[in-house]
Image (cartoon, rainbow, N blue to C red):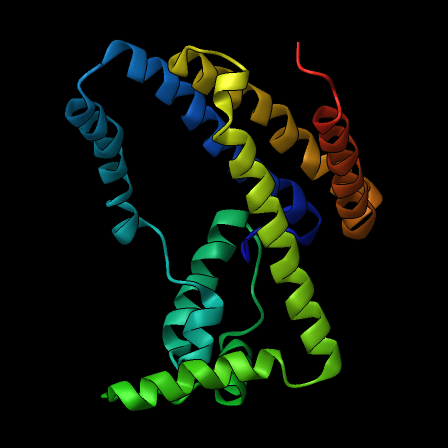
């Protein structure tokens, strides 16, 4: 996301999720054509190998390079980006000084060899930071609450597919189709109305619909 223009990051972040909806849709059709689960799993997994060339094509994160004290590589990435976009960078000496200053300011010192105890201590320390102040505790617990509720609703509905269709393949296709509009329009909604109103309204509407379904007589 760091290589995207700030004004396009929201839509891009939601746009990436459309791949999940498309995959669910295609998996339903693929499962209908391939009934052997081993062959199906192989057919669904092999396309993942296409990502391997990215290891040699995609450059490392600029932020990661700077924070980890590799300013020279960061300058090379800056130069490549400038060439692609047809823009001129400041003089090399000025860029080098700026990158090196940022690198020295944000550099992380990581021991080459860490024992299990020191690694565990580091992980616990990171968790403690999230709970260190009242505001951080509020933000952290709120995020975990929303993720937990969202996951329970999503997977709860996903696992109740028998109420939508008796055909598991058709259900997967319909499930993917239903997700696509949500992924496509969510980015524009958040971009226009903002994150908080969009999140609040989506949870409110979902709660109202689920309550209505719960109190709807069977049949």
User: Viewer-proximal residue, 197 or 144?
Assistant: 144
Q: Is residue 120 above or below residue 80?
A: below
The answer to which quarter of the image holds residue 70 is bottom left
List x then y, in percent, for residue 129.
58, 83
* Residue at image coords 49%, 89%: 104
- Please provide percent x and percent y for residue 114: 26, 88
Residue at left offset 48%, top offset 86%: 125
> In the shown orientation, is residue 103 left or right of residue 218?
left
Direction from residue 98 to residue 135 in the image, left or right? right
Question: Residue at position x 74%, y 42% from top?
Answer: 203
Quarter occupied by the C terminus: top right
On screen, 112 above or below 18?
A: below
**Which residue is depicted at the point 72% across and 17% down?**
217
Q: Does residue 97 show up?
A: no
Q: Position of residue 208 (x, y in %)?
A: 79, 33
How many numbered badges does the structure rendering display? 0
Q: Is residue 165 visible?
A: yes
Q: Position of residue 107 (x, y in %)?
A: 46, 85
Q: Taking 32 as reference, is 86 left or right?
A: right
Report which quarter residue 39 is drawn in.
Answer: top left
């Amino acid at each position: 996301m760091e290589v995207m223009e700030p004004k396009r990051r929201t839509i891009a972040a939601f746009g990436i999720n459309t791949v999940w909806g498309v995959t669910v849709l295609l998996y339903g059709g693929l499962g209908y054509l391939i009934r052997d689960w081993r062959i199906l799993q192989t057919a669904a997994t092999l396309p993942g190998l296409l990502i391997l060339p990215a290891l040699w094509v995609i450059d490392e994160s600029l932020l990661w390079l700077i924070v980890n004290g590799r300013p020279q590589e960061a300058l090379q990435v800056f130069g490549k980006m400038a060439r692609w976009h047809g823009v001129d960078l400041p003089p090399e000496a000025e860029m080098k000084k700026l990158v090196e200053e940022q690198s020295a300011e944000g550099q992380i010192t990581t021991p080459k060899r860490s024992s299990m105890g020191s690694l565990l201590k580091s992980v616990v320390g990171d968790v403690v930071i999230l709970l260190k102040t009242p505001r951080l505790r509020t933000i952290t617990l709120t995020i975990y609450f929303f993720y937990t509720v969202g996951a329970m609703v999503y997977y709860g509905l996903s696992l109740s597919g028998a109420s939508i269709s008796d055909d598991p393949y058709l259900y997967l296709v319909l499930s993917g189709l239903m997700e696509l509009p949500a992924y496509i329009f969510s980015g524009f909604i958040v971009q226009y109305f903002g994150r908080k109103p969009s999140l609040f309204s989506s949870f409110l509407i979902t709660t109202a619909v689920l309550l209505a379904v719960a109190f709807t007589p069977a049949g």
